[in-house]
Amino acid sequence: MTNTEIVEETIAFVKETLKGAEGGHDWFHIQRVFNNAIAIAKDEREADPLIVSLGALLHDIADPKFYDGDESVGPRMAREFLESLAVKEPVINHVVHIIENISFKNDFDQRSFSSLELNIVQDADRLDAIGAIGIARAFNYGGFKNRELYNPDIAPKLNMSKEEYKKSKAPTINHFYEKLLLLKDRMKTTSGKKIAQERHQFMERFLSQFYDEWDGKK
Ligand code: ADP
Ligand code: NI
């Protein structure tokens, strides 16, 4: 199988597996991350395009949030699928490491693995959590979880433990302070940093307008 065929088969598999997924985690999220990752990789010449593509396509194949917190489902599904295509073992291992290490909490926990390809896919995923799309996804997720939009009496909490963060029922606006506004300083690639800067500024404008409207000032 050629690399192009492997990527095409993977796209078909991911589309099928994510049918009916929540709007912030559906195929279109994967497609945007895939496109972001390819764009970032163009400026990172050393990156292996097959690993970047497969990592981006498979990174959310089984989000632990939707599997009772089980973090082993995604890596296992990805491995089984890639083995079924007879993808080379070192490529499979690298892709599985990307899936295991991409999430936000792993950045706080310190990653057990690092590579340029992981940096690229992680930056691409983070770009989709900020800016206009990031705002849409956050409120979509908040709605899915039946959260308040905003509550001036509930302050955001920084540096929550993994358990606390999972249990938090905080309003969606708090998520901006707990996660989204922190992402621009955690970007690892040059082009990722640049795009994140613009998207960050857009979120700040959104929040400022939101509070003005909330207070009846606009
Ligand atoms: P990703 O899809 O990038 O792996 P996550 O699974 O952490 O990221 O979250 C998916 C989307 O849902 C992101 O856009 C994220 O900002 C949003 N989200 C996650 N947790 C919350 C929350 N507590 N409140 C609002 N949005 C959230
Ligand atoms: Ni994602």
Image (cartoon, rainbow, N blue to C red):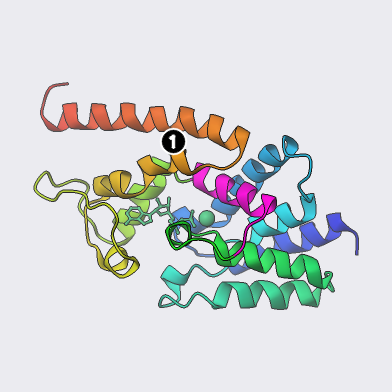
Q: Residue at x 58, y 72 (%)?
A: 74
Left or right of residue 45, residue 149 in this image: left
Instruction: Check disc 1 and report the residue beneath it.
Output: 131
- Residue 191 in the image: state x and y as whole percent: 61, 33
- Residue 142 in the image: state x and y as whole percent: 30, 55
Q: Is residue 117 magenta?
A: yes
Q: Tell me if residue 160 comes above or below residue 120 in the rendering.
A: below
Q: Tell me if residue 79 comes above or below residue 50 in the rendering.
A: below
Q: Residue at x 43, y 35 (%)?
A: 132
Q: Please name whichever residue, 185 or 88, is drawn nearer the observer in this view of the structure.
A: 185
Give the quadrant of the N terminus.
bottom right
Residue 212 visible, this orientation? yes
Give the residue at the far top of this rendering. Answer: 218
Left or right of residue 182, residue 35 in this image: right
Left or right of residue 133, residue 90 in this image: right
Magenta stretch: give its range. Answer: 113-128
Q: Please name whichever residue, 19 or 218, is drawn nearer the observer in this view of the structure.
A: 218
Q: Amino acid at mark 1?
A: Gly
The image quarter in which residue 19 lies: bottom right
Left or right of residue 139, residue 37 in this image: right
- Residue 47 in the image: state x and y as whole percent: 76, 47
